[in-house]
Each structure stands twice: as C-alpha cells, then as structure tokens.
Amino acid sequence: MKSVATGAACKGSSASRRCLLVVEDDLGLQKQLKWSLDEYELVFAATRQEAVAALRRHEPAVVLQDLGLPPEPDSVTEGLATLTEVLALSPHAKVIVLTGNAERGSALDAVRLGAYDFFQKPLDVDVLRLMLDRAFRMVALEDEVRKLAGATSSPRIQGIITADEGMERLCRTVEKVAATDVSVLILGESGTGKELLARAIHKLGSRSKGRFVAINCAAIPESLLASELFGHERGSFTGAHKTTPGKIEVASGGTLFLDEIGDMPAPLQATLLRFLQERVIERVGGREEIPVDVRVVCATNQRLEAMIAAGQFRQDLYYRIGEVTLTVPPLRERPGDTVLLAQFFLQRFSTELGCPVRGLSPDAVEAIESHDWPGNVRELESKIKTAVVMADGPLLTAADLGLREGGTDVLPLNLREARQQAERHAIQQALATAEGNLSRAAELLGIARPTLYDLMDRLGIERE
C-alpha cells in the first residue's frame, strides 16, 4: 500500500497501481481511506487549490471528493465549485462525490454538474470499492474508444468497433476472404453490421477501384426487381422509355451486394443462378447476352437452410452464393461491446450534433449491459443518438436512453458475490480486449500480473 501527498509522484506510476485523487479535509477519514484502499495509488488534497494542483500534476483518472470543503465545510458551495473546476480541467475524469444523508439533494446537483456518481456516508469500504472499480473500468473503456476512434491509421474494417474475441476473428477472416474473388454469404440478425463487412470485402479486395453497388431484395416489389437487377430495353414494358442497365451491369468491375437475398422471389432465383454460372445477363425485353465481370456478396437475416427444406430457396443457388459463409454474432453475444459501442456513438454524436454530453452514468452502463438489444448495433446507435439530443445533463442516464435500469443481470445484494461477479466480468473483458495477453490484460485492469493470476485462479477463469 502506498499513499502520496500532493507533492509526490503518481503520474506515470507503475501499471500495477491505479491513481485515485481523494479531496477530503477530514484527517480521520483520510487515514481510514489510506488503509482501506491499498490497491490504489492515493493522492490526498484538502482544499480546492490543492485538488487543482494535484489534478494537474498527477492526472488521476478517478477522483473521490467530499462536498463539504474549507473554507465552508458546513456548506456544499465550495465542494460544487471544486467539482466544476476539476471537470473543466479534466473532462474525462470520473468524480465520485462523498455526501452525508442530509445532502442527497446536493449530491444530485453534483451529478447534474457532471459527477460520475455519489456515495453516502458513513463509509462502507466494500461498496465504495465496487463503485471505484466500476469507475476505473469505465475509464479503461473510454480510453479504448478514443484509441480506436483516433488511430493514426484507419482501421482495416471501417465502422467495426469491437473488443470481442469472436468478432475480431471474424474481421481477420474478412481480410483473408477479401484477397480472393469467391462469392461470400454473410448471415446475421438485422442491425449487426452485415453491409459494413460487405463493404470491407470490396475495399480490401482487388476490385476496390470499381463500384460497390448495393440492392435490398426485400425493399423492391417483385414486379420491378428483375428490371432493377438485370436492366431493361426500351419499350419492354409500359414506362420503359429508354434502355437502362441494371445493378449487375452497373457493378461490372466492382462488387454487387445483394442484401436480404432470402427474400428474392423464386423465379428470380433461377435467373440469378444462371448469371452466377454463366456470368452473362439479358436485359428485360432484350435478346443480347451481355458479359459481366462482378464479385457477388450476399447477406440475409433468414435461415436459408430452413427455407431450402421448406422449398422456398434454391439449394443450388445457396451453394453458389455461399462459397464462403460468414456469420455475424448478435450484440448480446459480444460481452463488453455494448458499452464500448455506446461510448463510441456518444462521442461521435455529441461532436456532430454539438451537444455537451461527455459520458454515461452508472445506471446507464448497467442498463446498457443488461438490455438484450434485439435490434443489435443499429438499435444501440439510434438510442444513443436520440439520448444525446434529449439529455438534460452531461451524463446520459438510463432514463435518457429509455431503458430500465438493471434487468436480469443486476449485481446480487450479497457484497462478496457482487464483488466476485464484477471482478470476473472485468477480467473477462480485459482478456478479450488484450486478445488473451495476460500482461496487457493486467495493465488494462491496473493490477500486477501475479495478482491477475491469483484472481483468475480464485474465480475459476482458465489461463488460455
């Protein structure tokens, strides 16, 4: 255990420690915190001036601050002023304010000013430690988002933000597939990012200088879909005043993306199969065979094998479009990605829309992690955008997002179980982010590598 005054060094300290600034003038409480929070590198300050000096020197990620500070310790005026100045100097810092039972209204005022959370005295070290662990976990997530969003070189697959091991494996597979010219079938629920992967296959492949042409087979009436795909000759039907090339012809030299291929009518499935086999098309109303050189990528949220069994989709077409099949996992199966993506969208929309929202409140994080997200990334993006516009304070809350706080994954009331669950979740998330690298995972968690070994053994997490 180590604690330092405002003049000692904490910035740039060992990765095994986490720097916590404590702004508290009560020497007895300082001493209690010093001995209770031995897993942190503690920096103490008793006044606003000392707090600002410590903030500039040590750049702590998390601040624990009393609202009653001198010269008016019986009032919250100086405490709220300190909070405002701390957040102005370090907007990304997570400030947890300490309050008495009679100061709940002032604590809520502090949250509205941008405090991350509040903790009511008397001190319960186990609960406080859980709250601090959650704050440091949020800091690590936000750092990861800024790293991903501000990378000097563009990510190989633009628009894919993930720390999930399975999703990262899928991205590496996309890079391999893109180098070939095979037909690709992308399966996954609506809103999982199938078109992003299709665009990545085009961009990373040899046809990147050609056009990427997308068509949604479910969005166009059956009577018009053939004309959209294959084009038509002048006079071939009422309203056909000129010869018009179809999407397949327009995409020649590039990539054709057929979204919702499972909704393609049966007669067109046969025509598409012939094109894929012969690589020639005939426009509607035409007789001339037109050769087309195009890569085909298809996607659907339907179970094509079940449709084949029901006679709704051609098996030979299925094999032709799915020379390589990729399956995108739903957001609920990507642990850790929900909050990571939420932070990414929050930063993007707060900048684009000019709204002063800078983070997620603890109840918002809990609600995001416990929600099933049936609409996947698209649903999450929509909710964050709406919440950024409608939010009244600097932190998005569960109410802003229209989500119920907690849900089925709420932490248990037993403090020992709650801590173990929180530790297990944080370690699994760090391991996924670090791709199994234990040294990197320990650095992300702010603990020593031997400590990580001990925790993994105690929690039954295997070292792979």
Image (tube, helix red, strand yellow):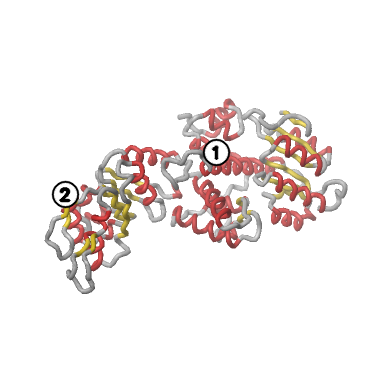
Q: Position of residue 279 (x, y in %)?
A: 18, 50
On screen, 434 above or below 104? Answer: above
Which residue occupies the extreme left position in the image?
287
- Residue occupying image coordinates x 41% and y 55%: 191
Q: Residues within 10 Å of mark 1 (few under 14, many from 20)?
A: some
For the point 68% across and 41% down, the residue is: 62
Q: Which corner quadrant holds the N terminus?
A: top right
Amino acid type of the residue that numbered disc 2 sits on in the rendered structure: Gln
**Residue 298 position in % (x across, y down):** 29, 51
Quarter of the rendering occupied by the C terminus:
top left
Residue 330 is left or right of residue 20, and the answer is: left
- What amino acid is labelled 1 in the image? Arg
Most extreme residue toward the front is 242
The residue under label 2 is: 277
Left/right of residue 440 with respect to residue 291 in the rendered view: right
Q: Does dot 2 land on a helix, a strand or a loop?
A: helix
